[in-house]
Image (spheres, coloured by chain):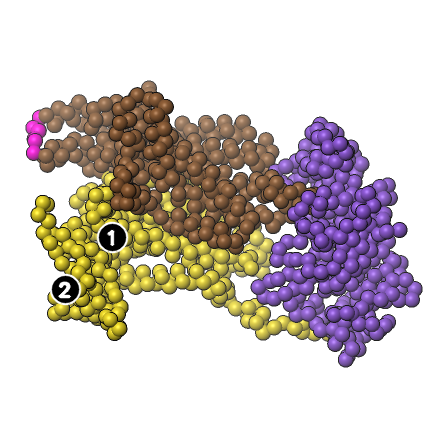
Chain colours: A purple, B brown, C yellow
């Protein structure tokens, strides 16, 4: 089956006064219909930028400089999002209606001077072609009714009253549900969730994850879930993409990643999770060193300065390509193959 | 919100009393009074007046009473709506002020409309196209505009018009319309003369407003709710107007309260330079000649305008920003 | 797996290290240096203040010297080259009596070249009121039979360039002293209000509210009109300074109060208290440095407002009075349009006002950006 989204060798560069930052440096992955793909990595690895690029909302001085993003939209047409004009009508018709974003902080992501209902109604009326294929207007009253139903769907209590509330009047969990409602309002094929649970406490986190899982099952929406929290990934993802410094280190089904990680980085990430079963009074494992400055990229494999298995002479001179490994999944590591990345 | 407005309105009489005391104290501060100046003027122009005549005038005007008596009398008259008599012009103050009030307000309104009509689009353009050529030009104009005293601008423009075009831009009407009854053509003539003082008056305010709008909007443009709106598929220009501009306007609206009285006061200097029949020059003369009832009345009007202006902008702000409105309820 | 507790240095560059060890003032200075416009403006201001210190040195004639015959001499523009030799000169002046008005009318005569010299002897004066001397920065070469009027003369024959230099001294000093007064009042009263709270806070707040409700320009007009006509220029000068700062301090006071209130709640103040620091130490070492740079930036931005207001007041005849000179007083000569048409150079003081205010604004903006610890 055709993937909903196929990202091929995406490159996004930021031209700063201090130099060129390769925020996304050749990232490829697929999202199958109805599947949840988790993108995981430390802060600054480029996971958010990747998904902003998909929506073509990368802010200057960032620019997509290469690669393709093939989106399988409604009516079965495949369109390369990288070629579309970010401000053009085609891209705008896709945004919100076919690919929707759940941003990071719902408090800041809602306008403080408009009610949450108004903001959802705006989305509904903007993409009214979905409900009025003949192009007639969707009245405010109809849109409001749809919004109330949406709120009910995502589990917001007293939906008719909440429609007239402001974002800052709602609790964290309700806000995030309203945000999800807004994202789902136009029935997109693909949902991008950018760290939706980071700002929430653990209990609310569990509720939101349940909601997303539920939505995904019922509507068959594909989700790209961005997070740095491996625990969340384990609960919700089907496939996992591990990123580091703008490159994909490892890709694979969630079971493979968690039970048989291949790449040294993935292994280090997993082993740094504190465990109840660890020996008491032992030191918490960490990854040696720290993330290099974006302008000070290490030559060769991006991870080699911190890698416990690095092979001097090889890992510091050439970057390994992402290749399938026996079993399932792929890793970019010379431990498994000697294929170099095409530079 | 009604409670909010009511609270402010209730404070008004108290403020007025305090203002009236302050104003009265300031008016009385210069040594001597109207008659001393009057006598001096007479003396310099050659005529003279006897001491008995001066004493008689003093009693007639009530200038020989102790200060607090004078103050109470003044307050008594004010509470009845009598603004008093101008000692210099020998006409009721209400008449003098009334003649010029309409024009003062019209000029201020013109300048206000001009300022906002120019500054908002300029500020929005500057913020959405930072570092473009037009942005640099606008920034330079803004800095220079803020630095130029408005009477200086008036002088330069008047001189330029006179020296290079032989045109005299003083006054509000062409000679043939000065005494004429109101007609459509007279209104047009008025507009033709009014735009220049209105622009001069508005330049500094426009420059300041553009800079503030640009700064505010730049701050808002990078906030997450703008990204969300973009991700929903809104067109760029529609989302800029609906969201960040709306939020950037809030602090600007709160400055309207200061702006209105500032306009009235700023027009004072411009009107003096450009010879316009404004309240301002009237106040100036009254202060210099110690025509105290006239000066006091005008100053009180300014005070009231300031307080009303602040109230208006507070109400506007509460109306625009639900965060303030809802919390007050 | 290497021992995870190894303290591996994570590649901090030497530049980053310098930044992390620099004191706050150094950081502010470095950030300010990057603003080229602000630096250029700061240099311009230094030039202005050089004139403020010793205006007579920069003057070419005695600013008080009137000579009705020398009225309205036009600007003598300095040329740097005499033919091909670098020898500065100005065109000479030639006068003709107008048969109808019987007034002398002057115009430039390019054929007569009056050389300009640096460091000439001119009228006598006292540096800073103490050291007598006759040295001036420039003037017409002695014995060349000409005089130097870089900005022409006014209707009383007074040299405008020299008067401008003295006016600069007055106007810039008023700006500075008024701001200093405002800052002192604002910081003290605002600080008491913010830190002590309670009754003192309420009273000071009401006073600030009242003062801010008064319409500034009319009140200033009224106050300056109230100054007795027979006061000496010096007393008038100080009175104007006090009047100007009477309303200005409220703005600063309110900001200082707001800062104190906010800072009181900051976690690092709490940490200092928990660590056992005394109140005085907390105020001096933790709170004051936090808003000091902000106060400096705000005051620098307040100076141009005060300068413009003083200029406007003097222009209307209510501020500085002759024989004292300020920019506003000089501009009074330009009120008459017919006079201006004859002598447009009388407008130059206005240009100088604009330049000074621009420079202050640019420096103030630069300081404000540099002082913001959360800036980039």
Rendered location of residue C67, percent (x, y): 11, 54
Residue C316 drawn at (x, y percent) = 25, 42
At x 26% / y 70%, what residue is drawn?
C81
Q: In which quarter of the view is residue B15 placed? A: top left
- Determine the main secondary structure of the stretch shown in magenta: loop
Residue wearing tag 2: C146
Q: Observer-nearest residue: A144 or C325?
A: A144
Q: Is residue B311 left or right of residue C309?
A: right
- Residue occupying image coordinates x 42% and y 29%: B12
Residue C192 pos. (x, y %): 44, 49
Chain part drawn in magenta: B46-52
Q: Can the viewer see residue B329 in this picture?
A: yes
Neighbour tally class for label 2: few under 14, some 14-19, many 20 plus, Cα within 10 Å: many
Residue position marked by numbered label 1 in the rendering: C345
Residue placed furthest toward the right: A327
Is B327 left, or right, of B309 in this rendering?
Answer: right
User: Number of numbered discs present?
Assistant: 2
User: Crowdedness of circle 1 by 10 Å Cα count: few (<14), some, many (20+)?
Assistant: some
């Amino acid at each position: 089956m055709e993937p909903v989204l196929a990202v091929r060798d995406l490159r996004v560069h930021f031209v700063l006064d201090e130099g060129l930052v390769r925020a996304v440096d050749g990232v490829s992955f697929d999202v199958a219909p109805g599947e949840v793909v988790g993108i995981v990595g430390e802060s600054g690895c480029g996971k958010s930028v990747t998904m902003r690029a998909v929506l073509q909302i990368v802010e200057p001085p960032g620019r997509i400089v290469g690669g393709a993003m093939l989106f399988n939209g409604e009516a079965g047409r495949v369109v390369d999002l990288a070629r579309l004009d970010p401000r053009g009508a085609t891209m705008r018709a896709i945004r919100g209606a076919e690919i929707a974003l759940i941003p990071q902080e719902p408090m800041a992501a809602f306008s403080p001077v408009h009610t949450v209902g108004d903001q959802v109604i705006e989305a509904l009326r903007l993409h009214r072609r979905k409900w009025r294929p003949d192009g007639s207007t969707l009245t405010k009253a109809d849109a409001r009714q749809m919004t109330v139903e949406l709120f009910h769907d995502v589990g917001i209590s007293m939906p008719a009253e909440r429609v007239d509330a402001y974002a800052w009047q709602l609790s964290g969990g309700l806000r995030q549900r309203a945000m999800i409602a807004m994202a789902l309002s136009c029935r997109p094929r693909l949902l991008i969730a950018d760290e939706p649970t980071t700002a929430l406490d653990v209990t609310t986190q569990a509720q939101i994850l349940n909601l997303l899982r539920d939505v995904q099952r019922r509507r068959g929406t594909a989700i790209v879930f961005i997070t740095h929290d491996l625990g969340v990934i384990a609960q919700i993802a089907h496939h996992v993409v591990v990123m580091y410094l703008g490159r994909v280190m490892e890709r694979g089904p969630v079971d493979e990643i968690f039970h048989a990680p291949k790449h040294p980085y993935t292994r280090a990430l997993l082993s740094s999770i504190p465990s109840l079963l660890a020996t008491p009074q032992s030191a918490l494992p960490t990854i040696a060193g720290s993330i290099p400055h974006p302008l000070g990229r290490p030559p060769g494999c991006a991870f080699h300065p911190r890698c416990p298995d690095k092979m001097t002479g090889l890992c510091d001179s050439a970057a390994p390509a992402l290749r399938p490994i026996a079993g399932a999944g792929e890793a970019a590591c010379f431990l498994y193959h000697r294929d170099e990345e095409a530079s | 919100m009604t409670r909010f407005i009511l609270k402010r309105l209730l404070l008004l009489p108290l403020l007025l009393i305090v203002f009236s005391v302050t104003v009265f104290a300031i008016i009385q501060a210069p040594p001597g009074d109207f008659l001393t100046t009057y006598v001096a003027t007479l003396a310099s122009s050659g005529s003279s007046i006897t001491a008995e005549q001066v004493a008689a005038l003093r009693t007639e005007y009530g200038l020989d009473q102790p200060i607090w008596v004078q103050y109470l009398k003044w307050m008594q008259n004010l509470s009845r709506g009598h603004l008093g008599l101008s000692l210099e012009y020998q006409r009721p103050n209400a008449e003098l002020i009334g003649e010029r009030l309409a024009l003062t307000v019209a000029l201020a309104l013109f300048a206000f409309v001009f300022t906002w009509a120019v500054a908002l689009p300029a500020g929005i353009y500057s913020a959405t196209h930072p570092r473009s050529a037009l942005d640099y030009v606008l920034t330079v104009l803004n800095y220079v505009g803020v630095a130029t005293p408005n009477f200086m601008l008036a002088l330069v423009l008047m001189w330029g018009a006179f020296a290079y075009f032989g045109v005299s831009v003083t006054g509000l009407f062409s000679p043939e319309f000065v005494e004429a009854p109101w007609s459509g053509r007279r209104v047009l003539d008025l507009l033709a003369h009014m735009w220049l003082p209105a622009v001069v008056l508005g330049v500094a305010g426009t420059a300041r407003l553009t800079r503030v709008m640009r700064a505010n909007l730049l701050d808002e443009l990078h906030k997450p709710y703008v990204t969300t709106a973009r991700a929903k598929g809104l067109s760029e220009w529609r989302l800029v107007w609906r969201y960040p501009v709306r939020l950037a306007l809030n602090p600007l609206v709160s400055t309207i309260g200061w702006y209105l009285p500032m306009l009235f006061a700023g027009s004072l200097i411009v009107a003096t330079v450009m010879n316009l029949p404004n309240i301002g020059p009237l106040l100036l003369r009254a202060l210099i000649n110690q025509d105290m009832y006239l000066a006091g009345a005008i100053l009180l009007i300014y005070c009231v305008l300031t307080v009303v202006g602040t109230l208006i902008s507070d109400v506007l702000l509460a109306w625009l920003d639900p965060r303030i409105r809802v919390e007050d309820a | 797996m290497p021992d995870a507790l190894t303290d591996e240095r994570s590649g901090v560059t030497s530049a980053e290290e310098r930044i992390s060890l620099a004191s706050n003032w150094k950081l502010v200075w470095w950030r300010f240096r990057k603003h080229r416009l602000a630096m250029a403006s700061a240099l311009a201001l230094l030039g202005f203040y050089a004139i403020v210190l010793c205006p007579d040195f920069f003057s070419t004639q005695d600013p008080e010297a009137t000579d009705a015959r020398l009225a309205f001499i036009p600007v003598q523009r300095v040329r740097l080259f005499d033919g091909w030799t670098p020898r500065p000169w100005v065109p000479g002046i030639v006068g003709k009596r107008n048969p109808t008005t019987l007034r002398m009318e002057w115009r430039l005569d390019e054929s007569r070249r009056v050389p300009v010299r640096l460091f000439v002897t001119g009228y006598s004066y006292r540096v800073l009121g103490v050291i007598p001397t006759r040295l001036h920065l420039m003037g017409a070469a002695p014995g060349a039979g000409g005089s130097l009027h870089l900005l022409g003369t006014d209707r009383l024959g007074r040299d405008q360039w020299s008067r401008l230099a003295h006016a600069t001294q007055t106007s810039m000093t008023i700006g500075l002293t008024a701001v200093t007064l405002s800052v002192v009042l604002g910081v003290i009263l605002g600080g008491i209000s913010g830190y002590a709270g309670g009754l003192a806070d309420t009273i000071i707040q009401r006073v600030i509210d009242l003062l801010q409700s008064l319409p500034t320009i009319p009140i200033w007009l009224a106050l300056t009109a109230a100054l007795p006509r027979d006061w000496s220029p010096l007393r008038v000068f100080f009175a104007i300074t006090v009047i100007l700062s009477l309303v200005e301090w409220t703005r600063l006071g309110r900001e200082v109060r707001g800062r104190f209130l906010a800072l009181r709640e900051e976690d690092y103040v709490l940490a200092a208290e928990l660590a056992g620091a005394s109140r005085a130490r907390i105020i001096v070492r933790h709170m004051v440095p936090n808003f000091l740079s902000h106060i400096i930036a705000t005051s620098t931005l307040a100076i141009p407002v005060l300068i413009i207001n003083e200029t406007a007041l003097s222009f209307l005849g209510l501020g500085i009075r002759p024989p004292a000179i300020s920019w506003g007083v000089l501009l009074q000569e330009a009120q008459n349009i017919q006079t201006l048409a004859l002598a447009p150079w009388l407008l130059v003081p206005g240009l100088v006002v604009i330049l000074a205010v621009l420079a202050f604004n640019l420096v103030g903006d630069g300081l404000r950006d540099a002082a913001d610890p959360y800036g980039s």
